[in-house]
C-alpha cells in the first residue's frame, strides 16, 4: 500500500500541527499569579451560599426552594409547625408572583424568606 501526498495535503498537515503546538505553548505559558482569581462577569457580583460553619453547637439549617408549584406548601407548613421548626424558603421571582398568598402564609408562620 502506498500513501500519496500532494503539496497541498502536506501544507495542510504542517499548518495543523504547528497550530496545535502553538496553542499548547501559549496555554502552558499563560502567566497567572498563584493565589489570585480571575474575575469574570459570571461571578463578579454573585454571592455564594454558605455550606459549612465551624461551631461547637449542634445545629442544622433547613432550606426549601420554591420555584415550580405550591401544591404541598400547606402540608409542609403544617408539619413544620407541628415540630416547632423554622426554615428558610428560597423563592424565585416568578413563584412569588404566581403564589403571593403562599408567600404571605410562609411569612406569617415566621419562616425566613430569601430571593436568590
Image (spheres, rainbow, N blue to C red):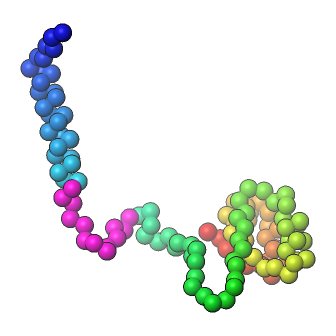
Hey, which residue is sitting farthest bottom in the picture? 56
Residue 12: where, in percent of width, then height?
16, 27
Magenta stretch: give its range: 28-40
Name above or below for residue 15 compared with residue 68.
above
- Location of the C terminus by quadrant is bottom right
Left of 59 or right of it: where is 21? left
Name above or below for residue 5 compared with residue 116.
above
Q: Magenta: predominant secondary structure element?
A: loop
Hey, which residue is sitting farthest top in the picture? 1
Which residue is at 67% across, 89% downward?
57
Residue 44: where, in percent of width, then height?
43, 70
- Location of the N terminus by quadrant is top left
Can residue 113 be seen at all in this image of the molecule? no
Residue 107 sits in quarter: bottom right
Hey, which residue is sitting farthest front in the picture? 1
Magenta span contains residue 98: no
Residue 24: where, in percent of width, then height?
21, 48
**Viewer-proximal residue among 17 and 101:** 17
Name above or below for residue 96 compared with residue 80.
above
**Viewer-proximal residue among 29 and 69:** 29
Left of 9 or right of it: where is 101? right
**Viewer-proximal residue among 4 and 42:** 4
**Viewer-proximal residue among 80 and 58:** 58
Magenta span contains residue 38: yes
Can residue 8 be seen at all in this image of the molecule? yes
Which residue is at 88% across, 66% downward?
74
Which residue is at 14% across, 33% downward?
15
Residue 66: where, in percent of width, then height?
73, 63
Residue 13 sits in quarter: top left
Left of 80 or right of it: where is 22? left
Hey, which residue is sitting farthest left in the picture? 7
Number of numbered markers: 0
Amino acid at each position: 500500500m502506498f500513501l500519496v501526498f500532494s503539496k497541498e495535503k502536506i501544507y495542510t498537515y504542517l499548518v495543523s500541527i504547528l497550530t496545535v503546538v502553538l496553542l499548547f505553548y501559549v496555554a502552558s505559558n499563560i502567566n497567572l499569579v498563584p493565589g489570585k482569581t480571575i474575575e469574570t462577569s459570571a461571578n463578579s457580583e454573585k454571592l455564594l451560599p454558605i455550606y459549612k460553619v465551624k461551631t461547637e453547637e449542634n445545629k442544622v439549617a433547613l432550606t426549601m426552594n420554591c420555584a415550580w408549584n405550591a401544591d404541598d406548601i400547606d402540608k409542609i407548613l403544617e408539619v413544620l409547625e407541628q415540630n416547632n421548626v423554622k426554615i428558610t424558603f428560597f423563592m424565585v421571582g416568578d413563584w412569588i408572583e404566581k403564589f403571593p398568598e403562599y408567600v404571605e402564609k410562609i411569612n406569617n408562620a415566621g419562616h425566613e424568606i430569601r430571593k436568590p
